């Protein structure tokens, strides 16, 4: 059995981790923290877990690092970089925040709004996107889980950039459900504001943009990246518009993606058009495309709390511990 702790277990990412790990056959969840709910039973805060766990939220100070095999850090941005440096070298650390995704401290500060504490520690972290970094994840002890928007956009563009078939700028229009903003109500995220609305936020300044550019590598293709708050709870739908270097047919585009993702367990090529309704509560990513002479649109859809956060974190844990990669992650999407 794998002894597991979850730091920051009361947020949507942390509780999604617990929900996923409860069906993992080798997971022994020993500890879960939530500073604002210390002493409260998990099922009291999340009644959907009644009868599935007797865990009680503990203070962060009681983290039993030496008695765990894995610690998931599901903390707000800025907190993991204070915790990670003091953790034992042999402990598998998987961070779900943005603290260790960006290599350049100046870029990190520009997009996150505060200095990177512990740039040396950042160098120990491997970027946890299995479809492009699987072999490094297998031997990692420190893993930085990708952002949800970054996962959707990187997976949509990576094969095309690798094959160098894109010319000029790429325009990205990415929409997210309200759960991506966390479980603390705020002016722009509570239900009455979002239920019948669609609005942009963070133009040219979203923190996932430098992460995307860093992973895609040096390229002449400028990325115009705009995110939107959408009137649904779970899911990301990302549209990517670009010009090709030459005329390619729909079959040729499909072959490009098949070359890179043909054996990937969680990427599904959609002959029609993706829909967030058909990936909810799952670790799957649906990708589809349409081409008109030399212009191409690629769509990607994923669940922001699963493949965009907790599901991908468990996928990374499986890889790093030599467990079958898909363990606990193959439940089909929920619809309706």
Image (tube, helix red, strand yellow):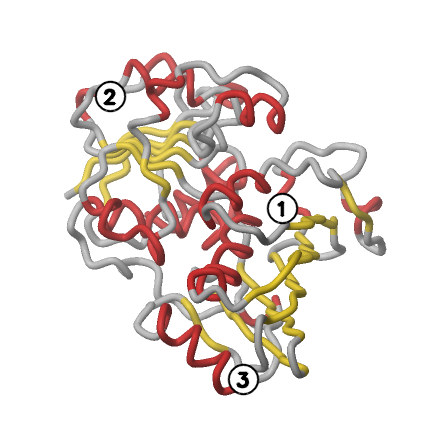
Residue 24 vs residue 76, the one in the foreground: 76
- Pointer 2 residue: 65
Query: Callout 1: helix, strand or loop?
Result: helix
Q: Quadrant of the N terminus?
A: top left
Q: Residues within 10 Å of mark 3 (few under 14, many from 20)?
A: few
Query: Is residue 281 visible to us here?
Result: no
| Mark number displayed over residue 271 | 3
**Residue 235 pos. (x, y %):** 60, 57
Q: Is residue 162 left or right of residue 237?
A: left
Sequence order check: which comes first, mark 1 or mark 3? 1
Res. 182 image quadrant: top right
Relative to residue 179, is residue 248 depicted above or below? below
Cα–Cα gap, marks 1 and 2: 29 Å
**Residue 335 pos. (x, y %):** 57, 72
Q: Residue at x 35, y 34 (%)?
A: 72
Cα–Cα gap, marks 3 and 2: 46 Å
């Amino acid at each position: 059995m794998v002894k597991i702790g979850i730091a920051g277990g009361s947020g949507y990412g942390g509780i999604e981790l617990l929900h996923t790990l409860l069906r993992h056959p080798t997971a022994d969840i020993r500890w879960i923290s939530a500073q604002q709910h210390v002493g409260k039973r998990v099922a009291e805060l999340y009644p959907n877990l009644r009868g599935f766990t007797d865990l009680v939220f503990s203070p962060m100070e009681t983290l039993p690092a030496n008695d765990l095999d894995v610690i998931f850090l599901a903390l707000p941005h800025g907190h993991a970089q204070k915790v990670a440096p003091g953790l034992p070298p042999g402990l598998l650390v998987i961070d779900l925040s943005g603290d260790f995704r960006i290599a350049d401290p100046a870029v990190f500060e520009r997009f996150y709004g505060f200095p990177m504490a512990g740039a040396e520690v950042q160098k120990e972290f491997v970027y946890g996107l299995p479809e492009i970094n699987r072999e490094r994840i297998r031997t990692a002890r420190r893993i930085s889980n990708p952002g949800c928007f970054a996962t959707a956009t990187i997976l949509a563009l990576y094969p095309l950039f690798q094959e160098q078939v894109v010319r000029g700028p790429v325009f990205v229009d990415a929409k997210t459900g309200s759960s991506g903003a966390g479980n603390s109500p705020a002016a722009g995220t509570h239900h009455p504001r979002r239920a019948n609305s669609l609005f942009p936020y963070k133009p040219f300044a979203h923190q996932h943009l430098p992460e995307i550019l860093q992973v895609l590598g040096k390229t002449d293709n400028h990325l115009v990246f705009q995110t939107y708050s959408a009137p649904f709870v779970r899911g990301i739908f990302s549209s990517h518009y670009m010009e090709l270097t030459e005329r390619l047919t729909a079959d040729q585009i499909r072959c490009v993606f098949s070359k890179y993702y043909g054996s990937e367990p969680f990427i599904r090529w959609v002959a029609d058009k993706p829909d967030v309704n058909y990936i909810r509560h799952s670790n799957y990513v649906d990708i589809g495309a349409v081409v008109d002479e030399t212009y191409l649109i690629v769509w990607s859809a994923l669940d922001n709390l699963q493949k965009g956060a907790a599901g991908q974190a468990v996928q990374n844990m499986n890889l790093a511990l030599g467990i079958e990669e898909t363990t606990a992650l193959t439940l089909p999407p929920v619809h309706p």
